């Protein structure tokens, strides 16, 4: 497959497949524009979208919003999250649904979704700290790289049509880097987004003078890229990345550990746990150090054989999808961490998982470092 030719032909023929503007978001927008809407009306607008309703309940119980006892009803979830948050979360649910569909590039879509939602949350936080519109900032962060998802869909459609495997990931990412702005402009046009958001989608890498929204998105992007390569960010690191004030950086440090739980709230897929067939095959020089992963499909024990300050390699009975964001707990302790599955390799009946730690609170990063220092796990 000639990736460049496929993408150029899709643009020339106006054949870029764009999902319709989310109907739930549209219903909520219309309702919130009326002067006397009720919580009952908001719940009714969401009730017919079972996937989104489930997202909202999980999100209301995530660390980002959790206060007090768990909520079990949509009306209670609305009260906790806030009515004005619902429309943008409906947009986020649409992006999430597209990201978690099957396909030859499904792992790349998961990566794009993780980065998009993290950018949305960081951008919203920056807007609040700077006295700007947080709702506009959230949507800008969520959609600024929307063209990337369209490119992945376009390449998957072509692979299915010509019955080929997915193109090499390096080619896909090169194409995303070059063309995500122009493909995003197609979505902005089809969805009739405001010009301010269209400007962000097309020009966030080189914001025009005076375009504060695009500049804010660019700063959020830098933070998210740093999170992808570092297990944790402290206030000093954030100040170097963003140039923000010490107060703003301290508030961002408080936000960052809440990001993974919010992302996971939109992932409806169960962890694919199967019944163990025996003791997992151990990797050479493995050590006695275990993590337990909990999910809707059950739990999975991971036997760690190598670890660094930023990740680990573990052996498990069940596989996990690439770029899946998972929460694991160090067995025998209260230490819980979020990690991204970066690579999976089959070892007989077991799987070797290579994972990178993601968005840890500084104190959790210190706890993990202590485990390495005390010899509980052999450093790689």
Image (cartoon, rainbow, N blue to C red):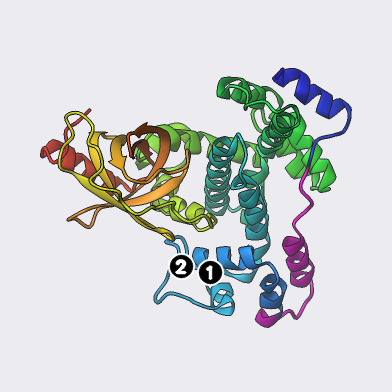
Snapshot quadrant of residue 184: top right
Q: Is the residue under label 1 in contact with that under label 2 (CB below 8 Å)?
A: yes
Is residue 138 highlighted in magenta? no
Q: Secondary structure at mark 2?
A: loop
Tell me which segment is drawn in magenta: 18-40
Residue 214 pos. (x, y %): 66, 38
Determine crowd level at label 2: few under 14, some 14-19, many 20+ residues with C-alpha closer than 10 A. many
Judged left or right of residue 352, residue 161 is right
Residue 223 higher or lower than 163, as above or below? below
Residue 158 in sight from this viewpoint: yes
Q: Which mark is residue 255?
A: none
Q: Which residue is mark 2?
A: 61
Q: Which residue is mark 1?
A: 57
Say which quadrant the N terminus sits in.
top right
Residue at 21 percent across and 39 percent down: it is: 369
Snapshot quadrant of residue 155: top right
Q: Secondary structure at mark 1?
A: helix
Q: CA distance from mark 2 to mark 1?
A: 7 Å
Residue 243 in sight from this viewpoint: no
Snapshot quadrant of residue 38: bottom right
The one nearer the camera, 62 or 100, is: 100
The one nearer the camera, 133 or 358, is: 358
Residue 316 higher or lower than 64, as above or below? above
Judged left or right of residue 370, residue 36 is right
Residue 24 pos. (x, y %): 73, 64
Residue 271 pos. (x, y %): 44, 53
Is residue 24 highlighted in magenta? yes
């Amino acid at each position: 497959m000639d990736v460049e030719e496929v993408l150029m032909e899709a643009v020339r023929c106006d054949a870029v497949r764009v999902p319709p503007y989310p109907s739930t978001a549209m219903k909520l927008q219309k309702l919130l524009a009326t002067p006397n809407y009720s919580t009952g009306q908001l719940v009714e607008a969401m009730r017919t979208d079972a996937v989104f309703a489930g997202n909202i309940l999980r999100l209301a119980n995530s660390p980002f919003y959790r206060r007090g006892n768990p909520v079990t009803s949509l009306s209670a979830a609305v009260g906790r999250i806030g009515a004005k948050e619902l429309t943008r979360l409906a947009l986020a649910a649409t992006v999430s649904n597209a990201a978690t569909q099957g396909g030859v590039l499904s792992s790349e879509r998961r990566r794009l979704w993780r980065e998009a939602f993290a950018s949305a949350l960081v951008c919203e936080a920056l807007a609040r700290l700077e006295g700007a519109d947080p709702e506009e900032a959230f949507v800008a962060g969520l959609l600024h790289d929307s063209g990337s998802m369209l490119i992945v869909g376009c390449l998957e459609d072509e692979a299915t049509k010509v019955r080929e495997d997915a193109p090499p990931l390096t080619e896909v990412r090169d194409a995303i880097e070059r063309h995500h702005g122009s493909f995003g402009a197609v979505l902005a046009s089809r969805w009739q987004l405001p010009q301010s958001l269209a400007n962000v989608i097309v020009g966030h890498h080189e914001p025009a003078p005076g375009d504060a929204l695009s500049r804010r998105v660019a700063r959020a992007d830098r933070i998210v890229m740093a999170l992808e390569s570092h297990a944790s960010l402290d206030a000093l690191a954030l100040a170097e990345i963003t140039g923000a004030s010490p107060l703003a950086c301290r508030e961002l440090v408080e936000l960052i550990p809440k990001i993974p739980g919010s992302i996971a709230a939109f992932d409806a897929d169960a962890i694919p746990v199967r019944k163990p067939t025996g003791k997992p095959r151990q990797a050479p020089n493995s050590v006695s150090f275990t993590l337990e992963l909990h999910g809707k499909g059950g739990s999975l024990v991971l036997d760690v054989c190598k670890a660094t300050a930023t990740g680990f390699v573990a052996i498990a009975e069940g596989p996990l999808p690439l770029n899946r964001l998972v929460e694991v707990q160090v067995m025998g302790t209260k230490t819980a961490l979020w990690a991204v599955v970066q690579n999976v390799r089959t070892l007989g009946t077991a799987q070797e998982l290579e994972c990178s730690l993601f968005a840890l609170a500084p104190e959790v990063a210190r706890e993990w470092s202590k485990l390495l220092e005390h010899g509980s796990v052999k450093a790689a």
